[in-house]
Amino acid sequence: MAEKGRRALDPPRGSSMMQRMKSPILVATSLAWSPREGADSFVLQEVSLTLEEGAFVTVMGPSGSGKTTLLHLLGGLETPDRGTVLLGGTDLFAQSQRKRTILRRRYLGYVFQFFQLLPDLSVRENIILPLLIAGKDPAMHQRELEEVVEVLDLQKLLDRQPHGLSGGEMQRVGIARAIAQRPPVLLCDEPTGNLSSKAGEETMRLFSKVRERYGISILLVTHNPRDAAYGDRVLFLRDGRLDPSHSLTGPGLDAAAVFSRLEELSI
């Protein structure tokens, strides 16, 4: 039953997790990026944000606003023209490529719009793939993997291949793969963009469940106001900038509030 004053489709507030929020796990300062070296036109300009331990932050913006580029910078997949990213207190871009890769594997899990599952592998094999890439023996992590499979209700799908799954099922596998190593941070790029509205709603509830269960910090970019309202804080990317004065937070945060702010900003 929906809480008084809240609509049934509005996401539940994560008050217990908000009370347990800790120190910053991911800090970006004054990021700027252009597609060509020396270009005058920047896709992102002076972007700063902080993701605390256990937080769920969403970033709203229209297609082409630089949301995916922002995730690539935060994950060290692209190098900014200016600015810094601290991941677990370490300056990501002050590291060699090898150390940067080690940091990514230690701290980050990724969830994608188009799932990025390997079609020739079973669901089980897709889930354990990050462990194999990291040189770990999945048998040594069997208990944790079984728990992830149970949390995401994948028990009956483990021996199937991706081509036989629905979009919602494939995204559940994608989330399981992303959290198989219990990373402190999930970076999510339009994770419901290729799903039906029902499957998208279920997927967003799973993110809240995973965050509550494991204390994982989530940074999710989207152009869907309902998805954005699942966050503790909603940031708005416009013209390559994140203006903190436009952000939304607090107990009144719902899809209607996000819609209203989008109209104010003409996004």
Image (cartoon, rainbow, N blue to C red):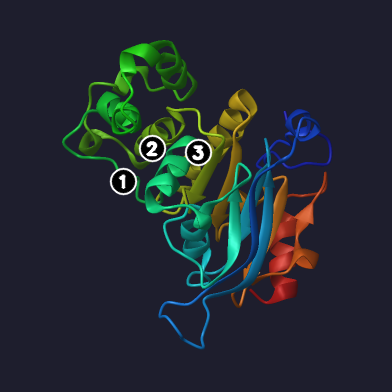
Local packing at callout 1 (Cα closer than 10 Å; few below 14, some 14-19, many 20+) is few
Give coordinates of residue 60: x percent, y percent.
Answer: 61, 61
> Number of numbered discs present?
3
The residue wearing badge 3 is: 203
| Label at residue 176 | none
Give coordinates of residue 219: x percent, y percent.
Answer: 58, 48
The residue lying at 64 percent from left, 67 percent from top is 47
Local packing at callout 3 (Cα closer than 10 Å; few below 14, some 14-19, many 20+) is many
The residue lying at 72 percent from left, 50 percent from top is 233
Q: Nearer the viewer, mark 3 or mark 2?
A: 2
Task: Please state which of residues 260 and 240 is positioned toward the viewer in this rendering.
Answer: 240
> Does 38 sit above or below residue 134?
below
**Secondary structure type for disc 3:** helix
Amino acid bearing label 3: Thr
Local packing at callout 2 (Cα closer than 10 Å; few below 14, some 14-19, many 20+) is many
The residue lying at 36 percent from left, 17 percent from top is 155
Amino acid bearing label 2: Gly
> Does 40 sit above or below residue 202?
below
Residue 2 seen: no
Measure the C-alpha gap from mark 2 to mark 1. Answer: 8 Å
Left of 142 or right of it: where is 235?
A: right
